[in-house]
Image (cartoon, rainbow, N blue to C red):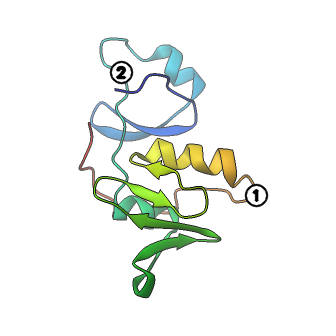
């Protein structure tokens, strides 16, 4: 479960992926809190990442992610990422010059917690 929810992050709310705002965080019922979304290849594509097949990784600008067993590893920061909101945290913390925007809704919802 997520310990501290942050605004402007994608979570599952009532079985749908939602960009949760500060207002949403205040209004959401406590008995049905937002759930994290597993970071999958369709989500990476939706954010604009492209596969780099020879390197077995995914790239977006100067960000390179390598698939692990149950997570992704950012090769620059050495941070492990398992959920979509953690990818958003990574960009907020280390790549402020790059805007991470959902470019497509062509993903499917699997791997929610």
Position of residue 27 in the picture relative to residue 38 (left or right): right
Front-most of 94 and 75? 75
Circle 1 is placed at which residue position? 97
The image quadrant that residue 29 belongs to is: top left
Q: Residue at x 54, y 56 (%)?
A: 78
Q: Specify few, some or many for label 1: CA neighbours under 10 Å numbering under 14, 14-19, or 20 or more.
A: few
As helix, strand or loop, the secondary structure at mark 1 comes to loop
- Choose mark 2 or mark 1, whichever is in front: 1
Q: Is residue 10 left or right of residue 34?
A: right
- Mark 2 element type: loop
Q: Dividing the picture into quarters, in which one does residue 2 lie?
A: top left
109 left or right, relative to 102? left
Q: Position of residue 105 (x, y in %)?
A: 41, 58
Residue located at (52% from left, 56% from top): 102
Please determine whether, in this image, residue 35 is positioned above or below residue 46: above
* Earlier residue among tags 2 and 1: 2
**Residue at 29% across / 30% down in the picture?**
14
Residue at 36% across, 53% down: 71
Q: Residues within 10 Å of mark 2 (few under 14, many from 20)?
A: some
Whole-percent x, y for residue 85 in the image: 48, 42
CA distance for labels 2 and 1: 31 Å
Point out the image quarter for the N terminus.
top left
- In-image side of 41 versus 80 (left or right): left
Q: Is the C terminus in the top left, top right, bottom left or bottom right quadrant?
A: top left
Q: Is residue 93 above or below residue 30?
A: below
Image spot of residue 32 (x, y percent)? 31, 18
Work out which residue is located at the far top of the displayed protein and give it: 30
Residue 8 % position (x, y): 57, 37
Which residue does the numbered mark 2 point to in the structure image? Answer: 33
């Amino acid at each position: 479960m997520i310990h501290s929810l942050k605004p402007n992050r994608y979570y599952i709310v009532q079985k749908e992926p939602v960009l949760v705002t500060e207002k949403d965080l205040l209004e959401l019922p406590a008995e049905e809190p937002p759930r994290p979304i597993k970071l999958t290849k369709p989500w990476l594509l939706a954010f604009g990442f492209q596969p780099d097949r020879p390197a077995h990784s995914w790239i977006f600008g100067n960000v390179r992610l390598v698939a692990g067993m149950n997570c992704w590893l950012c090769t620059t920061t050495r941070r492990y990422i398992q959920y979509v909101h953690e990818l958003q945290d990574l960009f907020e913390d280390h790549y402020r010059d790059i805007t991470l925007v959902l470019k497509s809704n062509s993903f499917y919802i699997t791997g929610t917690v």
